[in-house]
Amino acid sequence: MASCRFCQIASHANFVVFEDDLSIAFLDYRPLFIGHTLLIPKAHYETLGDLPGELLGPFFANVQLLARAVEEGMHAEGSFVAINNRVSQSVPHLHVHIVPRRKKDGLRGFFWPRQAHPGEAQMQEAQTAIRAALANLSASFG
């Protein structure tokens, strides 16, 4: 969809950490924490309910892989994985937030205190770390 910001991003995203035929993952430009990643299907689906059933398994396999990679790559204790459907969905294109978490990191419930845009060097470090973790995890799965 030409007017969709994520459809536009999918064709030329910066800080891509993962891509396959179905989806693309890139670092959020206003992250909760460095390494905050968004996974989107390349085709335009507004909400999770719009994603065809045959794509659920492959898409969520990518979510699982990225959650592990973000944790490993960012040396996090865990992760927060979330989807908004319409309400609080800043871009009307299905996207999964994968956020590295640490104990006492200040994130409480669904209060999302966004940070200022990090420097490009920090974004590149996070990109490299998550890509390396993905390569390591992909080798383990496959």
Image (cartoon, rainbow, N blue to C red):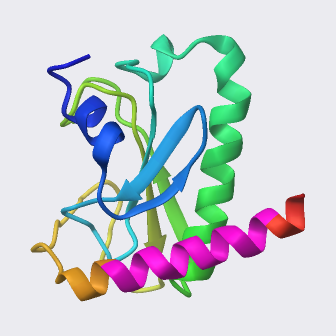
Q: Position of residue 58 (x, y in %)?
A: 71, 33
Q: Position of residue 68 (x, y in %)?
A: 66, 66
Instruction: Assign the magenta stretch its main secondary structure.
Output: helix
Q: Nearer the viewer, residue 124 or 45?
A: 124
Q: Position of residue 123 (x, y in %)?
A: 30, 78
Q: Is residue 69 magenta?
A: no
Q: Which residue is located at x 18 percent, y 63 percent?
A: 30
Answer whether residue 97 is visible to the viewer in this image: no
Q: Nearer the viewer, residue 119 or 76?
A: 119
Q: Is residue 135 magenta?
A: yes
Q: Which residue is located at x 17 percent, y 66 percent?
A: 114
Q: Which residue is located at x 14 percent, y 21 percent?
A: 3
8 sits left or right of 78 in the view: left
Q: Nearer the viewer, residue 77 or 59?
A: 59
Please say if 104 is above or below 78.
below
Q: Quadrant of residue 133?
A: bottom right
